[in-house]
Image (spheres, coloured by chain):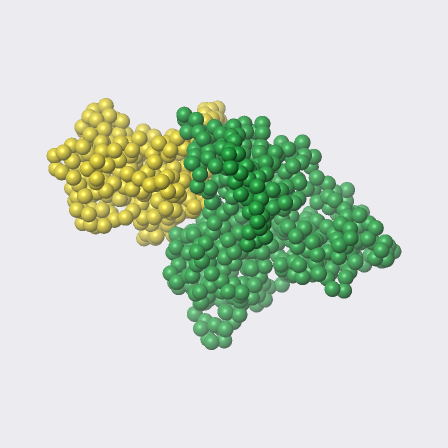
Chain colours: A green, B yellow
Amino acid sequence: MSDNGQDSNPAGSKGQKRSRVIALKPRERMKIPRHLPDEQDPKERITNFCEVSEGFNIEKALEEATRCLECNDPVCMKACPVNVDIPAFIQLLYQGDYDGAIRKIRESNYLPAICGRVCPQENLCENSCIVGKKLEPLAIGKMERFLADYEAQRGSFTPPPVASSKGQSVAVVGSGPGGLTVAAELAQMGYDVTIFEALHEAGGVLKYGIPEFRLPKQIVDEEVERIKALGVKIETNVIIGRTLTIDELLGEMGFGAVYIGTGAGSPRFLNIPGENLSGVYSASELLTRVNLMKAYKFPEFDTPLKMGKKVVVLGGGDVAMDAVRTSKRLGPEQTLLLYRRSREEMPARLEEVHHAEEEGIEFHFLTSPVAIHGDANGWVKSIECQKMELGEPDEQGRRRPIPVEGSNFTIETDTVVVAIGQSPNPIIQQTTPGLETTKWGTITVDESGATSRPGIFAGGDISRGGATVIQAVADGKQASRSIDAYLTKLRSEGVEESGRETADQRESTGK
Amino acid sequence: MYRIIETQELAPTITRLTVEAPLVAKKRKAGNFVIVRATPTGERIPLTIVDSDPEKGTIVLIVQAIGKTTHIISELRAGYHFEDVVGPLGEPTPVSEFGTVVCIGGGVGTAVIYPIARALKAAGNRVISIVGARNRELIILEDEMAAVSDKLIVTTDDGSYGKKGFVTDALQEIIDVQGKPDAVYAIGPFPMMRAVADVTREPDIRTWVSLNPIMMDGTGMCGACRVSVGGELKFACVDGPEFDAHQVNFDELIARNQTYAGPEQKALETWKNRVETTDCRQL
């Protein structure tokens, strides 16, 4: 940033509204082109794990804010799963009220530094932006990220007010985006919230799944700290279903309600021959080794990873993109991605596909793996594929891939990464009697986020099977309203045994 | 904080650690394991829970120094701590009253078979145990195993103690002399478990093995520990670690376990050199 955060602030200090010197008419505002953040050069960035996008500096953020037409009917806000008041925060940004702008976002979304980076804005708010109907839409995500980063840079975060204690406690299982949101919402309402995390660090998929170059782990840690600032407690190394059960949380530990946000992290495999050869990884294993365990810093960090000379990644979603770009940074000579449909059907974010192409990933479309072949030592040697063609659209409207007879061919490779999707984590479903699940292993919830058992709520990928960070945030917000309603009812019924002794009890059982 | 209360060297390279982990101690059943991390930059490795004391809130782990991480753990002493301990993981051992059960422990696998033998004995079985190792020095938990077994046979590859030969020789002798046992539990190196499976396959003796493939999270989220059991894909961390020995594809498992052999060797050498050249006050 050219700005040092103090005197050079072109919009003046907080509260001093920027006069509309450039009170441009809508037509003039629309002449301003969309601003793009600086990005690390592709040749450079494939040699490191630093963030690709450098984000907006203060000038770009302010100029981008100028482009907003302040529509009477802000469709961008409706398109946001958590209905962030986008025109209001952009107006505050425009006025130079950076604290006011980030507070405005945080009223609806407690994770702006994260969502500003990983939300698929091009399908949500930015897709509905009126400016975008004729020209390029506003860079809403980049402005959100700027406000979050600028606040962190200035150290100006102050926790929002927390309501007086309601004397009831809530257990949140999983510290991913959904769990963090539920915790933040309920803590602000005055509930005593404890998050239980299975891994040794908080953040869930934000830590183990999404790579450093898209979402630096320090950003996640900072968001977690802001949630702790609300009084939320986080217990790592506790696996609900193993270390403690849901029924223990609701019973002897005295929690009034439980939110399950354990996500979908269980890797799916293709069930083709050779999938268990050495050198075949699930995307989950590759990404967890690199992101959470820092295998890219081996041997400074102890977790190893063995990348060969030629890596083939299978899949076309965001996880496949993360896996293939992570692989590229580990230094193979060639990095390929095979997808069984065409580029148009790929579910991955366009921005990430574009980044991957810039980084020299070779895409092979309409290509489906049939078998993986190994050498005498049980290592991957090659992958046998089949060409596909597109047939009729399926239930989701995507054209179905159909194998082309006699089109088999072989690609020599020594490393294969399977990135064809994840299933819900199964442990809680297996260890919680009476908790209804679907045939896909997801937990059944109603619109309010309530499960089949009173006091137990769920959301995010554990109930959806595989969605986005922002959807988990939206589910978390819905569930926190439902949990509040549930606990309020309990209070009014005078069933107050729940929250009272929990603190002491947990002390005595704590680590 | 997972404080270490006590350590004891059971044999050269094999160390027993008593660790504070109250929640794990309370829940643990025979066959469960924990994932531990020794240092802030450490890797996550699985270790079987050998014993636990719910009252004191402690668990017992036994580790053999093979790679860098296990070397570091072996050097931990009372008052030190693990960075992380999480569990109990895995499905507990299926324990019921079978009749006569043979429990086989090979090398440090004896640490894993011990709690299972004890549980089987407590369930009313007649327990015959076979404990084997390369030589006398590497035989561990002999007294403990004797205490939970109706009969204990010790074998060493070099004949320096007990019967000379492999655990499979002793097992074969039991089958030949006393007849088929009702069940066999075998835990040790993969080749040993494969050999036991080969001995019991033909006489059709129900046989369990406990697998310790490469693992990371221990909750079914990475797939590193996947094994083929009866042609089906299983995750040892959540579906196991114990499986029907006759259904396990050991060849595949042995090959997969070599995945990180290269980097692991490098890590160990780097670490050992560091120790030799570092001032003792910094250790």
Residue A458 % position (x, y): 49, 60
Q: Residue at x 46, y 35 (%)?
A: A371
Q: Is residue B16 left or right of A327 when viewed as pictured?
A: left
Which residue occupies the foreground of this view, B242 or B127?
B242
Residue B126, picture quadrant: top left
Q: Residue at x 26, y 44 (%)?
A: B116
In the image, residue A206 above or below residue A383: below
Which residue occupies the foreground of this view, A270 or A175?
A270
* Extreme residue toward the front, this view: A405
Q: Is residue A253 left or right of A288 when viewed as pictured?
A: left
* Extreme residue toward the left, this view: B177
Residue A292 % position (x, y): 52, 42
Asked whether residue A494 appears in the rendered view, the answer is yes
Residue A435 % position (x, y): 42, 61
Q: Residue at x 37, y 34 (%)?
A: B253
Residue A311 % position (x, y): 54, 32
In the image, residue A180 above or below residue B1: below
